Image: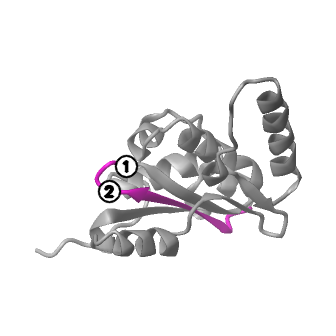
Amino acid sequence: MLAHVASAQGKVAVENIMGHETTVRYDVIPAGIFTLPEIGRVGITEQQARERARAAGQNPDEAVKVGRFRYAGLGKAQATGDTTGLFKVIAESPSGKILGVHILGAHAADLVHEAALAMQVGATVTHMAEMIHAHPTLAEGLMEAAEDVEGKAIHQMRKRMPS
């Protein structure tokens, strides 16, 4: 655990001492790794999601949906010349519940907080995909990855459908 978790735990402890029962949502703690490129993450990994589905007797290929979007497809990344990176959104199917988000690239540790908020309030990938994002921004990558979860991404190459 990191300093931001300890701070949250301290606030929760004080609230509970004051008689206001509250808890820390350990499933929705964002983390940043300040490497080059940066890493931002919240929730579980694709592998963890698939293992949970398997343990629940579900077919992981049906129960877990993953969307991706590359930084190279973002206008702002092109404008700044920093096109290395990827957004990845892991969701439960068919509910669309966001299980995890992983971002590798410029400002990833800042960008992941939009995903953490979405998870905190129970927003789905549909909500994330439908939210209008300013253009050109790096945050558009989350919207694009959420659209990809739903098979609705239009700003990336798709495999050709058989004729």
Marking on residue 134:
none
Answer above or below: position of 9 versus 59. Answer: above
In the image, residue 121 sits, relative to residue 137, either above or below, namely: above
Crowding at mark 2 (Cα within 10 Å: few <14, some 14-19, many 20+): some
Taking 153 as reference, is 9 left or right? right
- Residue 35, given in percent of the width and then of the height, sits at 84, 69
Describe the element under mark 1 as helix, strand or loop.
Answer: loop
| Nearer the observer, 131 or 153 | 131
- Give the amino acid at mark 2: Ser
The residue segment tinted magenta is 82-96
What residue sits 85% from the left and 31% below the top?
Answer: 14
Q: Is residue 2 left or right of residue 63?
A: right
Looking at the rendered image, the quarter that the C terminus falls into is bottom left
Residue at 49% over, 75% down? 47
**Front in this rendered view, residue 79 or 65:** 65
- The residues tagged by marks 2 and 1 sit, at their Cα atoms, a distance apart of 5 Å
- Name the residue tied to disc 2: 93
The residue depicted at 64 percent of the width and 61 percent of the height is 103
Mark 2 lies on a secondary structure that is: loop
Task: Name above or below for residue 34 compared with residue 51.
Answer: above
Name the residue type under label 1.
Answer: Gly
Count of numbered circles on the image: 2
> Which residue is nearer to you in this view: 8 or 76?
8
Q: Which residue is mark 1?
A: 96
Question: In the rendering, at what x and y percent does residue 87 appear?
Answer: 57, 60
Position above or below: 5 against 57? above
Residue 148: name its quadrant: bottom left
> Could you say which quadrant of the image residue 78 lies in?
bottom right
Q: For the residue carrying disc 1, how many other residues have a C-alpha within 10 Å: few (<14), some (14-19), or many (20+)?
A: many
Mark 2 touches mark 1? (CB < 8 Å)? yes
Q: Please check the rendered image and state whether residue 5 is part of the magenta-colored stretch, yes or no.
A: no
